[in-house]
């Protein structure tokens, strides 16, 4: 019997693979767009970011970090590190909503995005599937 956990997990089905790719692509593209908008800094983005309690001077660095993280997530070889960075970024977004006393759905949205990032990765990557408890 093999002790390698990844050997026991088969490659994802075509449906799971494509679902994971589409989910990762959609979420990654949305995060990339958000990062680029923070770099471009249109008036609406500046207003909303300041409303969330951030100084205007941190919008550009946030945009650069988010853009780099999203690009890393969209590249298959660096997708896991990108997902880790995006998860941390989204945790900060949840915190900002909690501090502002925003409605529950606004707090839950970034958390949901974080979950969807990892679901997309697990659906398309056999090695990540091996780390979770379920089996095909």
Image (tube, rainbow, N blue to C red):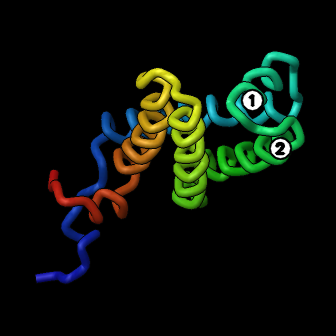
Compared to 124, does 102 lie above or below?
A: above
Residue at x-position 53% and y-position 46%: 91
Residue appearing at x 19%, y 83% in the figure? 3
Does residue 77 appear left or right of residue 67 in this picture?
A: left
Query: In this orientation, which residue lies closer to the viewer: 117 or 58?
Result: 58
Q: Position of residue 60 (x, y in %)?
A: 86, 41
Q: Residue furthest left?
A: 1
* Rendering coords of residue 30 (x, y %): 62, 29
The reply to whether residue 21 is in sight is: no
Q: Is residue 51 visible?
A: yes
The residue sitting at 59% across, 46% down in the picture is: 92
Q: Circles 2 and 1: CB distance less than 8 Å?
A: yes
Q: Quadrant of residue 78?
A: bottom right
For marks 2 and 1 on the same chain, the one whose residue lies earlier in the sequence: 1
**Which residue was labeled with disc 2?**
58
Vertical side of 45 occupied by 78: above or below:
below
Q: Residues within 10 Å of mark 2 (few under 14, many from 20)?
A: few
Quadrant of the snapshot with the N terminus? bottom left
- Residue at (36%, 63%) from the top-left corner? 127
Element at label 1:
helix
Residue 109 percent location from the top left of the image:
47, 28
Compared to residue 71, the image places residue 23 above or below, namely above
Residue 97 position in % (x across, y down): 55, 32
Q: Tell me: 124 left or right of 11.
A: right
Residue in front for this viewpoint, 41 or 48: 48
Q: Secondary structure at mark 2?
A: helix
Q: CA distance from mark 2 to mark 1?
A: 9 Å
Q: Is residue 109 toward the left or the right of residue 32 in the image?
A: left
| Numbered circle sitting on residue 49 | 1
Of residues 13 and 28, the one drawn nearer to the viewer in this rendering: 28
């Amino acid at each position: 019997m093999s002790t390698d956990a990844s050997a026991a997990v088969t490659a994802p089905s075509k449906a799971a693979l494509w679902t994971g790719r589409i989910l990762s692509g959609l979420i990654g593209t949305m995060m990339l767009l958000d990062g680029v908008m923070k770099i471009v800094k249109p008036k609406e983005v500046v207003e909303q970011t300041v409303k969330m309690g951030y100084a205007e001077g941190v919008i550009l660095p946030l945009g650069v970090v988010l853009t780099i993280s999203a690009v890393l997530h969209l590249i298959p070889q660096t997708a896991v590190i990108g997902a880790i960075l995006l998860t941390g970024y989204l945790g900060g977004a949840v915190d900002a909503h909690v501090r502002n006393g925003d409605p529950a759905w606004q707090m839950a949205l970034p958390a949901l995005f974080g979950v969807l990032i990892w679901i997309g990765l697990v659906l398309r990557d056999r090695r990540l599937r091996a780390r979770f408890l379920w089996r095909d």
